[in-house]
Amino acid sequence: MKRNLYDDDHEAFRATVAAFLDREVVPHVEEWEENHLVDRGMWVKAAEAGVIGLAIPEEFGGAGVADFRFEMVRSEEIARRGVGGVTGGWGVSDGIVPGYLMAFGTQAQKEKYLTGLASGAMIGAIAMTEPGAGSDLQGITTKAVRDGDEWVINGAKTFITNGHHADFVIVVARTNPDVKAARGTSLFIVDADTPGFERGRKLAKLGLEAQDTAELSFTDVRVPADALLGELDGGFVHLMVNLPTERLLIGSGTLAAARAALEWTGEYVFSRPAFGQTIGDFQNTRFELAELETRVDALEAFIDRCALALNAGELTAVDAAKAKYLGSDLSIEVIDRCLQLFGGYGYMLEYPIARAFKDNRIQAIFGGANEVMKELIGRDIAQRHRPA
């Protein structure tokens, strides 16, 4: 079935992304994975090539293009090359962080941070998860206390993407302990050179080895009053506003990963001989591919609708949760079953299917665990059907 989601501008961007990845990323994947850190200069080169910064307004150095389809094009080219573990930090610094600054930042905050992000000179992070609070953000204990013209932040965060490279971090902290977190939490921008802010170890992960993931600590970190991002005690509301975009980023990325896995597998099974024919000539192989491709086609139709809804400002948090849950669960299954068709070679990291197997597993966990996504969807169903 012909896909009508993209136009000539999207395809031109695809060519730009593909050329950049082949030139500046693919040759360095093994080195960066071994170092558990991507070369910081890659971000500047990505900005110069126009691969990042698209959604940032032109006045701050970006392209001013608020079209989620460009994010999807980028994800597809990344997935085709199996380099999601190298470019994963873009999803936060270029995909999530600018949204908070554009929606809730002051003019001064936008001029400083959006300009830095657009040029690649700055890398951003967002610190939500804590050692004792993952998907349940109401359990966060990091606190910010007002002291004259400053806020004093104390607490710890973990699993923070871009934690080591970040020049600034958007921190979720309790500002009113006397009410529920949903009504007493705020967002603060903390510059990385602020006294009391420390980066912990680079976390060793199952996959995404080159992606910078770290622990962060805040010990009597003093920030000025104008470091508050958005409304005081409005942090949860601000987080909810951006959740549809964040979860669709995951959903569309998993679609790209599943599609790439099917392409690699198709190429492999119809060239690999076994028992006098190719692996692809066995009925079991064709049935496996037929089932998986049909289900990925269905996922694609839903994700494409979600993308257009997001562009129109109509994507709900519930539909975004469906995209995240459905996409991540299906991609994990698709990649697992495709790996099986590679046989022993599927277990070798020189093959992209093996890297995808380990890199993709996190998709069902971060951005809100899929169990939480189902709960959100289930609540919506109950609300619609429960008698008044």
Image (spheres, rainbow, N blue to C red):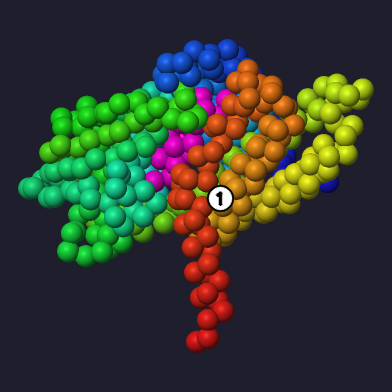
Q: Give left or right: position of 54 versus 180.
A: right
Q: Is residue 216 left or right of residue 195?
A: right
Q: Report the predominant secondary structure element of the magenta stretch.
A: helix
> What is the span of residues highlighted in magenta in the rendered image?
83-100
Residue at figure coordinates x 49%, y 56% from the top left: 371
Quadrant housing residue 232: bottom left
Residue 163: x %, y % from top left: 34, 31
Is 323 situated above or below 212? below
Task: Choose between 16 and 29: the one closer to the eye.
Answer: 29
Q: Which residue: 40% across, 27% down?
A: 204
Which secondary structure, mark 1? Answer: helix
Q: How many marks?
A: 1
Amino acid type, mark 1: Lys
Residue 2 seen in render: no
In reply to whether residue 233 is colored magenta, the answer given is no
Task: Specify the farthest residue to the left.
Answer: 148
Say above or below: 62 vs 33. below
Image height of 351 relative to 215, above or below: above
User: In this rendering, does residue 299 appear at all?
Assistant: yes
Q: Position of residue 64 (x, y in %)?
A: 51, 38
Q: Position of residue 267 (x, y in %)?
A: 79, 26
Q: Quadrant of residue 131?
A: top left
Residue, disc 1 = 324
Instruction: Identify which residue, 141 or 192, lies in the foreground.
Output: 141
